[in-house]
Image (cartoon, grey):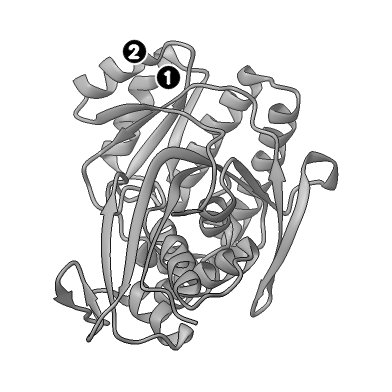
Amino acid sequence: MFRKDIVASSPGKFILLGEHAVVYGKPAVALAINKRFLCRVQLGEIDALNGMPINPKIHPHISYILKTSGVTNVTIHTQSEIPSSSGLGSSAALCTSLSAAIRAIKGENIDVKDLANDAFNAEYEVQRGASPLDTSCSAFGKGIALNCPKSMGKYIWTAEKERNKWDIFEIPVPKMTFVVGYTGIKAHTGQLVERVRKYKKHNKFATDIVNEIGDVTFEGMDCISKYDVTGLGRAMTKSHKLLSILGVSCRELDKLVSASLKYSYGAKLTGSGGGGSMIALTDKPDKVCETIRLHGGMPFIIKTDVPGVTLE
């Protein structure tokens, strides 16, 4: 039986380690953040988003989820605290909250693994390649690791696409302070994922860099388990250098990362790159915010260990 009105919300995230390499089955870690995407779904006469008809070319994630759910004639209202195309998981939070709302309005019992899988399929289709990291983090919240040692976390589910396979784990999140610096430049995840794919296909050096990002991610995971913020910071900074070599950083990100290092254990871009945001691990968040602001970024201090998708 259909319900008439459902509200769901999901957290954004930042990738701590492993972006881009995770698309190829390498390990990665993401943490949910205290900025959320809210989605209200109501039964209506046409498919509409915030008062306008849904256009598949403009709203591909929403169109995909509606199409695969079999639900029609719904009015969707969205409200986001997450900057769009910022590298902070706005599309994953959208997909996860929308999937939860659609399943709930159909009267289904909600399994968080199904929401994570729905959202992952949408991201994979729209971006022509993705990992289940962002969507699992938005669905489950707190900390998520892919392809990590079993001793590090609690196994949740496994996702597979083509030749790639990811085992998804919940991991303990020690209390750490991060500052996000948003460049204000919208990142185009699909384009950057495709750029890396082509580079990797035609250049063995790119494959070596992807493998090294995976190795650094394992190093960082070990530091997290030991609450070694100094070692974790080193892994973050090394990861940024490798991502820069891979060609997904930009001048604005490099500037904010470099400026933040003076007051941080480590700093790096987060997400697909090409703009979007960087993160810094620090015990001097006010100093980092000030230097990011002085170098043209928009900073904010973030809290981790936050819940995943919720329904009202």
Left or right, 233 with respect to 260, comes to right
In the rendered image, the residue lying farthest to the right is 151
Left or right, 307 with respect to 146, comes to left
Q: Secondary structure at mark 1?
A: helix
Residue 286 circle label? 2
Residues at marks 1 and 2, CA–CA distance in whole angstroms: 13 Å
Total numbered labels placed on residues in the image: 2
Residue 205 shows in this picture: no
Left or right, 59 with respect to 223, comes to left
Based on the displayed image, in which of its 4 quarters is residue 206 positioned? bottom right
Mark 1 vs mark 2, foreground winner is: 2
| x, y percent for residue 170 | 69, 46
Query: What residue do we see at 27% from left, 47% from top?
Result: 83
Amino acid found under the numbered disc labelled 2 = Asp
Query: What residue do we see at 42% from left, 19% from top?
Result: 261
Amino acid found under the numbered disc labelled 1 = Leu
Looking at the image, which is closer to me, 163 or 7? 7
Query: What residue do we see at 64% from left, 25% from top?
Result: 174
Badge 1 vs badge 2, beta-carbon distance below 8 Å: no
Whether 124 is drawn above or below 185: the answer is below
- The residue singled out by tag 1 in the image is 261
Residue 67 circle label? none
Q: Which quadrant holds the C terminus? A: bottom left
Looking at the image, which is closer to me, 201 or 193? 193
In the rendered image, the residue lying farthest to the left is 52
Looking at the image, which is closer to me, 187 or 175? 175
Left or right, 113 with respect to 94, comes to right
